[in-house]
Image (cartoon, rainbow, N blue to C red):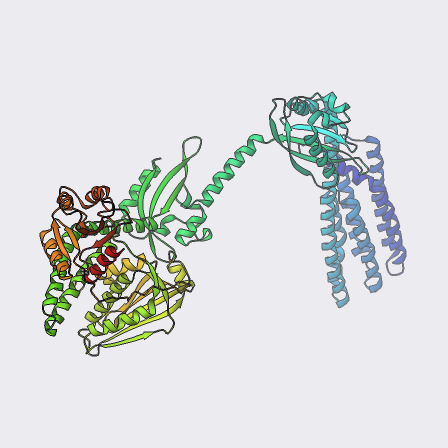
Amino acid sequence: MDLNSDDLLKREQVKLLYEAIPLTVAATIINASVLVVVTRNVIETKLALVWLASILIITFIRLGTYQFYRKAQPEASQTARWKTYFTIGSISAGVLWGSTALFLFPESSIIHQVFVAFIVGGMCAGAVTSLSYLQLPVFSFLFFALNPLIIRFFTVGSEVTNTMGVMLFLFLVMVSISALRTYQNTRQNINLRIHSEQQEKVILESKLEQQVIFDNAPVGIWLVDVDGRYRFVNKTFCDAVGIPESAFLTTNHLSDLLGEKAAANHLKSDRECLEKDEPHLSQETLTFVDGKPHLMEITRVKVKDDSGKVTATVGIAMDITERHLAEDKLRKLSEAIKQAGESVIITDRQGTIEYVNPSFTKITGYSSEEVLGKNPRILKSGNQTEEYYEHLWSTISSGKVWHSTVVDRRKDGSQYPALMTISPILDINGTITHYVGIQQDMTAHEALDEKFRQAQKMEALGTLVGGIAHDFNNMLAGMTGNLYLAKTKVADLPDVMMKLDSVEELSFRAAEMIQQLLTFARQGRIIMKPFGLTSFIKAMSKLSKASIPENISFHSELCHEELVVKGDATQLQQVLMNLLNNARDAVNDVPEPKIVLKIEEFKANKDFTSNHPDVYGTLFAHLIVSDNGSGISDTDKEQIFDPFYTTKEVGLGTGLGLSMTYGAIQSHGGVLEVESTLGEGSSFHIYLPLKEEKEMVDVHANLNEVISGQGELILVVDDNADVRRTCKEVLKDLDYQVLEASDGLEAIEQLTEHKDDIALIIMDVVMPRLGGVKSAERIKKRYPDMKIIFATGYDKDETLKSEMPSDRHLVLSKPYNIVTLSRIIREQLDS
């Protein structure tokens, strides 16, 4: 409040004090007279009359002062003088009422003492109402009127008077508090009234200015009565919508001005405002004079008359189109940060964290409440040097962006690699106010890198194996053919036959090993067929038992139910042999060596599913090979599935067995796990998905009888002389006639010369001058009915995928089993 208003306040306070004098005078005369009458028998009459005369004189002087005040009607500048007059009168009256403790206090009558206190207290209570417009008059009156009586009661010293003294003191405190509250309330009321009068005056004086302000305000303003008729519309709104004010004031159909949809929303919001006691907020779309839709935020308030009746509504409309677009852009940006897969952290200029997004919590394990107000150093793992952080800070504090990889620590203590970017945030003056850091968890990326490096190893291995497969298989083909011929010569020598059988078995196992290497390196074909794993393991268990030394206890625990899986039986046979051979080597130095082979049905639980998210299905065949051998150290367990990694002595292991085992199980969609404690043994767990259907393929069908020929002429085409010679001798032993050719061109020449005699061709695929496929194409054009069997020592699925004949042709892989060869030849000739 300004100085003029303060003067007005004081004038009003003094005015109210003087207006209360007549009532105060009447109360004084009545109470003083009653007090003298009541105490006339216990107080000396002369003293009582002197006191009464004194208080009446003061009272009539105050009444005279009141009359002069009314007549003078003083200005605000004269208020201080009249305030002084009134204060002197109030103090004088208080002193006289307090003097009752001397002149009208009967020591001999407790009843009269109480009556005196009652009369004085009543005057004090009345003073709270009549004198509280100013603090000095009321509190001085209360002080001088009550304190002498309180002292007098305590001076008498009896129990009753002491009690009265205490009660009067408490009464003084209460009326003082009441007087203070009354003063504050009346002061506030006077202030409000003065302020209201001033506002009313300002409103009246500035009506024209208000009109100018309304018309030029940056918001639309209108006044609509309860019947929906416009009483006022400001120029800003009219100019915006391109409609003159007169049209608003005279229309009965708002839809003609704003359009049906906009008008309907507008009138609906007006009705809703009339139904509510609080301001009504709405958003409406209006078409402006520019022809574009604008989003308006409209606040409506009811207008009431003096009786409280609602007469109209005031609408204030603000164009928030640009703000809405900006807010929508900010919302998208906020949601983008919130939903980002990368961790986002915002700090102030000193590095104190102010915001983290949900991905930060997901990656680090810290909730936002745990890190807000702290420094990002809580993520430090110790993998970066102090120089690293000094360089980081000097970079970003100079306004540059920092890019780097980092290894940080999660809440649980585990560490994670991350790709980090930290950028400064600048204000409009280019001053750094904050920093924003973005981290991308590179754990999965590093895992992919590791898989890529592993794939490169496999590719190198596949290239190596693919390169030697042809020559190796050709040598094995020569060996197996000669072994067959040798066995025909010594059929009556069992010991020799047994040795030759062993060599033959080793030859084919070597061929299987090459095929396994190709498959492991993803260059071989896996033939996946459903078969009964339980029966297969039973058969394998019997064969494996024969290869395990008798000093090793070998025990099988096989379930009774047939567990059907879809897989490559040859691969799984090799897997089992690898695991059993490793177990056999592991128990060599154990006093009581033991190997256990177990198979059971397994139903995946939550832990298994979460640990192996890439494995599908819930039912698995669980194969376990365990031993009580030397065990595997934690360091070795991390590398045992790497190619060429072995813990065996030189010459006892290639480091490929477990690598091939791991690759084979992965190719079957299964899981391979190892549990091992150094010095206590190991257990390898294999989980293979079970098939619900029970169709099976007999993987043990083994026809051992050789089918002889009937003297037919067969052309053997191969660039390897040893293979040709051996094949020729084998075929002759099978009662066939044989011609030889070293390449495709020579084969065509032989066929031209013996076209009516040759019944079948065994054709190598890759040969110099003219390969087998091209040669076969020429032969088929001239002799469509000619039967051709292709043979190759290469990896026909990868190395020769561009060289191989169509699927309708039969292809044998070298080395081939003589029994199989004899049956295929016979089937081709008889077909």
- The image shows residue 124 at horizontal and vertical percentages of 79, 51
Left/right placement of residue 802 relative to residue 149 reads left
Q: Which quadrant holds the N terminus?
A: top right
Quadrant of residue 815 within the rendered picture: bottom left
Taking 14 as reference, is 106 above or below it? below
Left/right placement of residue 618 relative to residue 58 reads left
Foreground residue, 166 or 786? 786
Foreground residue, 457 or 386? 457
Q: How many marks?
A: 0
Q: Which quadrant holds the C terminus?
A: bottom left
- The image shows residue 641 at horizontal and vertical percentages of 25, 59
- The image shows residue 634 at horizontal and vertical percentages of 25, 64
The structure residue drawn at horizontal position 14% and vertical position 47%, both measured from the top left corner, is 754
- The image shows residue 100 at horizontal and vertical percentages of 80, 54
Quadrant of residue 257 within the rendered picture: top right
The structure residue drawn at horizontal position 13% and vertical position 43%, both measured from the top left corner, is 749
Taking 156 as reference, is 792 above or below it? above
The structure residue drawn at horizontal position 72% and vertical position 41%, both measured from the top left corner, is 188
Quadrant of residue 709 within the rendered picture: bottom left
Foreground residue, 621 or 262? 621
In this view of the protein, can residue 512 be seen by the observer? no
Left/right placement of residue 750 relative to residue 638 reads left
In this view of the protein, can residue 248 be seen by the observer? yes
Taking 269 as reference, is 244 above or below it? above
